[in-house]
Amino acid sequence: MFIDYITLMLINLAAGLALLAAYVYFGLGESNQRRWIPGFGVVGAIALVTGLHMTLTWPVIGSFNIAFGETTVLFGILFVGTSLALAMGWDLLTLGVYGFFAGLVSLVIGFRIINLGAIPISLLAGIGFILVGLGGVFSAPTLYFKKNRLLRSVGAIVLIAATLIFTFIGLSSYWAHLANFSTWQPMPK
C-alpha cells in the first residue's frame, strides 16, 4: 500500500527547527532547562517513528526515502537525545558532535537535490536542507561557546530561515496532497 506522510515529516521538521531556534537564542544557559523537554521529546518521537518507517520500508518513490527518511531519523534521534539529556541534566556537547555529522548529511543532500533537480522546488528544498545542515555543523561550537550571543543569534537566524522554508514546503504539500489524493483508494484484495 502506498503511504505518503512526507507532509507530516515536513511540518514536524518546521516545528522542531522553530523550537531549536528558540532554544539556541533563549534557552542555552538559562537555569530552567526542563521547560524544553516536552517540545524536543514530541518532535523527536514523531521524527524518529516516521523516519525509521520510511527508511526501513521505502513507502514513497525513488530516493525521497533516503533524503527525507534518513535525515528525519538523524533529526529525530537528536531531538529525543536532547530531551533525555535535558531531563537528566546531562551536557549537550556530545549531541552537538553527532549534530555535526547529521549536518554534513543534510548539506550533501541539499546540494544533491539542487544538482539533480529532484523535485519541482529543488532550489528551495535544497537551500532548506543546506541551512539545516549548517545548523548541525555549527551545533558543537555553539554549545561550546554558548555564552557568545553573536554566534547564538546567527544560529537562530539560520534555523528560522530553514523553518520558514520547510513551513512553506510543508503547507504547500498539504494543499497539493489533499487534491492529489482526494480520489485515491486502496487496491482491492
Image (spheres, rainbow, N blue to C red):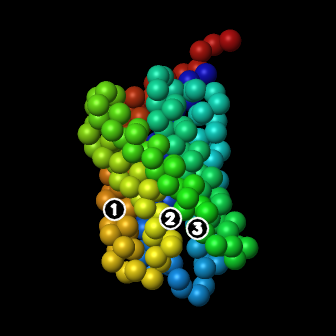
* Alpha carbon distance from label 1 to label 2: 15 Å
Q: Is residue 23 left or right of residue 164?
A: right
| Secondary element type, mark 1 | helix
Mark 3 packing: few (<14 Cα in 10 Å), some, or many (20+)? Answer: some
Q: Earlier in the sequence, mark 3 or mark 2?
A: 3
Q: Position of residue 82 (x, y in %)?
A: 62, 64
* Alpha carbon distance from label 3 to label 1: 20 Å
| Secondary element type, mark 3 | helix
| Secondary element type, mark 2 | helix
| Residue in the picture at 41% in, 51% down | 133
Residue denoted by label 2:
140
Residue furthest to the top = 189
Q: In the rendered structure, are the residues bearing label 1 and label 2 in contact, judged by CB atoms less than 8 Å apart? A: no
Mark 2 packing: few (<14 Cα in 10 Å), some, or many (20+)? Answer: many
Residue denoted by label 3:
93
Residue furthest to the right = 88
Q: Amino acid at mark 2?
A: Ala
Q: Is residue 141 above or below residue 176?
A: below
Residue denoted by label 1:
158
Q: Is residue 109 left or right of residue 116?
A: right
| Residue in the picture at 67% in, 68% down | 85
Q: In the rendered structure, are the residues bearing label 3 and label 1 in contact, judged by CB atoms less than 8 Å apart? A: no
Q: Position of residue 170 (x, y in %)?
A: 40, 46
